[in-house]
Image (cartoon, helix red, strand yellow):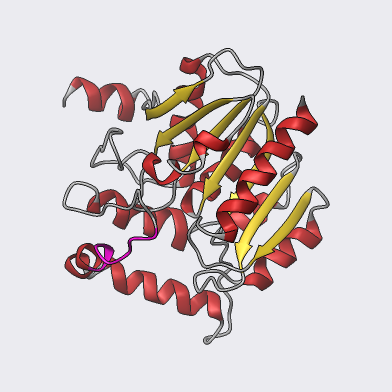
Amino acid sequence: MAFDTFFHRVLRIPYKMHVALDKNKRAKQTVIFIHGLGSSASMWQDITPKINNARVVSVDLLGFGSSPKPKWMKYNARQQASALHRTIIRLGSYENLIIVGHSLGSLVAIEYARKHPLMAKRLILCSPPLYQPSDKVFARDNIYITIYKFLRKKPAAVIKGSRYLRANKGLKIDQQTLPAYVKSLESGIENQDAADRLKTVKVPVDIIYGRLDLLLITKNLKLVANANKNIELHPVASGHEVIGFHHDKLVKLINESLHIED
C-alpha cells in the first residue's frame, strides 16, 4: 500500500484541495468558492474579480481540476467537506467565512456549515440539487435519480455530452475526472440527505435558483426554507449555471453580505 493511501485512507487524514485562487490575504473576511459536479475553480473566473474587501479563495473539489484524485474515495459531501476544512485551516482562515457553492458544491457547503458552525458565518447556495426520494413511483425526485443512475452507466456519453455544455467555463469531464464524476453523482447527489441537514443549519443561508433550471425541484427548496427561518430564497430568470441574472444576483449578495458582516 502506498504511503499516500495509508496516510489518507487508513489514518483518515483528509486530503488538501488545490487552491486555484487566493487573493487579498490580509482582509478580515473570507469568501470560499466551491464549484459544481464535473467542474473546477475556473468556473468562478468572471465573479471573483468583482468581490470587494474580502479574501477570495476558490478551490478544486477532490477528483476535479488540479486536486488529488484518489480512486478509493466515495466522493461524498462528507469527505469533500473534511478536505475543505483541512484546506481552510492550512490557509490560516478560521472565522468570518462566507461559503459559496454551486450545485454539488452547495451540498458540500451545507455539510461544512453543519460540522463547523463557528467558522461558517453565511452560506450562499447556487442551484442546490436537493432531492428527497418518495414512495410515489413517478415523483420528480425519483425520476431525476433514475436518470442519474442511467448516466453513470454511460461514461462515454457523459464525456461526449459535456463538450457541448459551454455555459460553465470550468466544466471538464474526461478520463481523469470521470471516476470522481461517477462516484460524486452516486454518493453526493443520488444518495444524499442534504435537505434534512440544511433544515438544521444555524447560520444565514441564501439560495439562488433559476426559474428555468431543469435540474432543480423548487418545491424541495421551498419546503426547506419553510422549515428553517435562516434561509432566504432568491429566484432569478436563469437556468442551472451561474451566468446572466444568476451571476449578477450572486455578486450582489456576496458584496451585501460582506457589508453586513463588516
Which residue occupies the foreground of this view, 42 or 144? 42
Q: Looking at this rendering, what residue extends furthest in the bottom direction?
A: 138
Q: At 72% from the left edge and 52% from the top edge, which residue is drawn?
A: 199
82 relative to 170, above or below: above
Q: Looking at this rendering, what residue extends furthest in the right direction?
A: 229
Residue 115 rendering spot, x and y as whole percentages: 61, 34
Which residue occupies the foreground of this view, 154 or 128? 128
Residue 165 rendering spot, x and y as whole percentages: 32, 64
Q: At 83% from the left edge and 52% from the top edge, which residue is drawn?
A: 229
- In this rendering, would 164 be left or right of 34? left
- In this rendering, would 92 be left or right of 260? left
Q: Count the numbered circles shown.
A: 0
Q: Quadrant of the C terminus?
A: top right
- In this rendering, would 226 be left or right of 54? right
Q: Quadrant of the N terminus?
A: top left
Quadrant for residue 186, please give it.
bottom left
Residue 44 rendering spot, x and y as whole percentages: 45, 43
Quadrant for residue 159, please give it.
bottom left
196 relative to 63, above or below: below
Q: Which residues are magenta?
A: 161-167
- In this rendering, would 249 be left or right of 151? right
Residue 53 rendering spot, x and y as whole percentages: 64, 24
Q: At 48% from the left edge and 45% from the top edge, which residue is drawn?
A: 77
Which residue occupies the foreground of this view, 40 or 182? 40
Magenta span dominant secondary structure: loop
Q: Is residue 261 magenta?
A: no
Q: At 50% from the left edge and 23% from the top edge, which residue is drawn?
A: 88
